[in-house]
Amino acid sequence: MEERHRYRSILLFGMPGSGKGTQGAVLGQLPSFVHISMGDVFRKIPRKGKFGREIEQYTSQGMMVPDDLTVRIFERHLNILEMQELLIPELHTLVLDGMPRSYNQAERLAGFIDVIQIFHLKIDDNRKVVERLKARALSENRLDDMSEEVIHRRLQTYHDETFKTLSFYPGDLILDVDASRRAIDVLCDVANRLARIIRP
């Protein structure tokens, strides 16, 4: 990846169904934040195109999209946002949901994003996560979350690969948040921390 400016960034970590998208969408409504959900970026890419066909090979089976492809799509998405002036690096803070998802991605993005805070949304009860994912699949027509086999594979992938990515970052950047609570209670914890670290 070509190094340019570094994007000030907040990372949302957590297993599928932990509420990253919900929290990111709320933060993205604030004037100085730009929310990017890599899952949404992947889903919006036309399935008939080259990227779309390649992505579907992995997501339909609950597997992670390879690092190289993910980083290329992420960089392209940032370029599009900048060209549309929806992202102005000097003014905006990125809220990244689902990026980075592996230690290798974190290494590749180190010179590209300036991480100022990480929220680790934790849910200890896997059954609650499975219930959330099934409910979301029905309400949002996410076919990839309908199958219990795919759900369990995604959760295993998170524990095997994504969770380890946290170890790339200094511990003082990470705030563990109990994400099994109501979304509004999780948001209060997130907002309180951001109010302390974001300069006016």
Image (cartoon, rainbow, N blue to C red):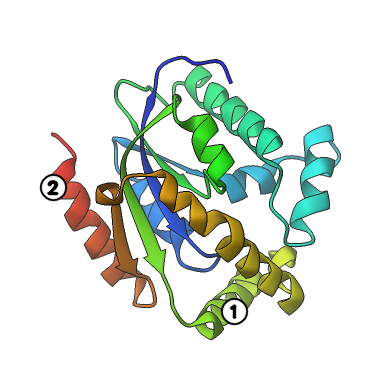
Q: Mark 2 near mark 1, Cβ–Cβ under 8 Å? A: no
Where's the N terminus, which quadrant?
top right
x, y (%) of residue 60?
79, 59
Q: Nearer the viewer, residue 42 or 140?
A: 42
Q: Nearer the viewer, residue 21 or 122?
A: 122
Q: Secondary structure at mark 2?
A: helix
Q: Secondary structure at mark 1?
A: helix
Q: Residues within 10 Å of mark 2 (few under 14, many from 20)?
A: few
Q: Is residue 120 left or right of residue 60?
A: left
Task: Name which quarter of the figure residue 135 lies in.
Answer: bottom right
Query: What residue is drawn where x is 84% and y is 43%?
Result: 53
Q: Nearer the viewer, residue 138 or 53?
A: 53
Where's the C terminus, which quadrant?
top left
Q: Amino acid at mark 2?
A: Arg
Distance of mark 2 from mark 1, alpha carbons?
Answer: 34 Å
**Residue identified by numbered label 1:** 130
Q: Residues within 10 Å of mark 1 (few under 14, many from 20)?
A: some
**Residue identified by numbered label 2:** 196
x, y (%) of residue 36?
49, 42
x, y (%) of residue 111?
44, 24
Query: What residue is drawn where x is 63% and y is 68%?
Result: 156
Task: Name which quarter of the figure residue 87 lies in.
Answer: top left
